[in-house]
Image: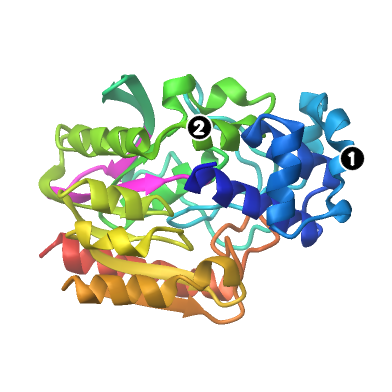
Amino acid sequence: MNDVQRYFVEEFVEEYHEGHMSRREMMRRVLLITGGVASAATTLLTLGCGKDSGTSGATNATAAPAATAARAETPQATAVAAATPPATAVPPAGARGAATMPPPAVSTDPIVREDDPTIRAEMVQFPGPAGQVFGYLARPRSGPAVPGVIVIHENRGLLEPNMDIARRFAKEGFAALAVDLVSRQGGTAKFASDPAQIPAILGRIPQADHVADMAAGIAYLKTVEGVRREGFGVGGGMAFALAMGSPEVRAAVPFYGSTRPEELAKTQAAVLAFYGEADTRITAQAPAVEQALRGAGRTVETRVEPGAGHAFFNNAARSYNADAARNAWPRMLEWFARYLNA
């Protein structure tokens, strides 16, 4: 498995052990990624899962109907810039590349409506290296040119909560583009009947292709009226990858994202990295991330939110930590304002 696939598998195992995902659904998702019963069992054993993981049920899990995914607990996000989904999340009329999601388990914060008179929000398509890329663009309706931000979705594809994140950025004076990283396979909406396939699809796509599609998003933002042509920021777990892969990224704010610290010297971006104190699997990287970036002479700040776990910013999941999320949002805005307006 590559790093992304292993990351997803580790997340599914965590959700199972925490009681957020059934054994059957965990096995089905691992099988979709590994492609076989034997490899799934071996992978789970390397992660410390033995008989309690239900590997004996793998054969049945391969035939699980699409409805199983719809009945499963809402999966935790792996990478979001922020998350404030509405009570019901439905894509705008005529949307392409977006899919519906189950009602969130928690919804306490306000959202920005698509018809907010101060912003413009719409589904868009733009050219990528392998064809058209789907996305969702939100920007201020009027005023001077603003900095651009790439919003990177979690492992479920481009959903309404990600669109709300883009609209929230627009309200704060940014042009935000949420890129659908499932575009090469037809877009998130194509897999609405069985969204459990999306992590497996994302894991099979080479990271270089993800970076290329996000970089195409930066190129597209440069053509949008009212967006400044220099200085871009990114948020989300793949922010590390895009920040290393594109010299045009001036600021990056990864949320509980995994990376290879030894490769971080490639970026020129100012990095603000958020972690959850209880998310020990990912947060253990924080010291190495900070050391690598400081050693390369980069601007970096790491913040570990007390008591927060993985996906603490996703209030559609049980992992949502309101205090941590509300603390992180203004800090991220200040970081982007500081380094994108320089």
> Which mark identifies residue 20?
none
Q: In this view, does 30 lie to the left or right of 263?
A: right
Q: Which of marks 1 and 2 is in front?
A: 1
Residue 34 location (% of width, % of height) = 64, 35
Tell me where the magenta segment starts and ends, as one range: 136-154
Rounded to the nearest angstrom, the CA distance separating label 1 from label 2 is 25 Å
Q: Which of 84 and 235 is in front in this view?
A: 235
Query: In the image, is 60 to the left or to the right of 222?
Result: right
Vertical side of 88 occupied by 243: above or below: below
Q: Name the residue under label 1.
A: 56
Q: Does the magenta-highlighted stretch encompass residue 98?
A: no
Q: What residue type is labelled 1?
A: Ser
Q: Is residue 178 above or below residue 127?
A: below
Of the image marks 1 and 2, the number of the one nearer the N terminus: 1
Q: In which quarter of the image is the C terminus?
A: bottom left
Crowding around mark 1 (Cα neighbors within 10 Å: few <14, some 14 to 19, many 20+) is few
For disc 2, the marked residue is 204
State whether residue 69 is above or below residue 12: above
SS for callout 2: helix
Neighbourhood count class around disc 2 (C-alpha, 10 Å): few under 14, some 14–19, many 20 upward: some
Residue 153 painted magenta: yes
Residue 126: x, y in percent? 28, 24
- Along the line of sight, which residue is nearer the eye, 131 or 139? 131
Q: What element carries label 1?
A: helix
Which residue is pictured at 53% across the width and 40% down the height?
160
Q: Which of 17 and 72 is in front in this view?
A: 17
Image x and y of residue 286, in percent: 43, 73
User: Please, what is the dominant secondary structure of the magenta stretch?
Assistant: strand
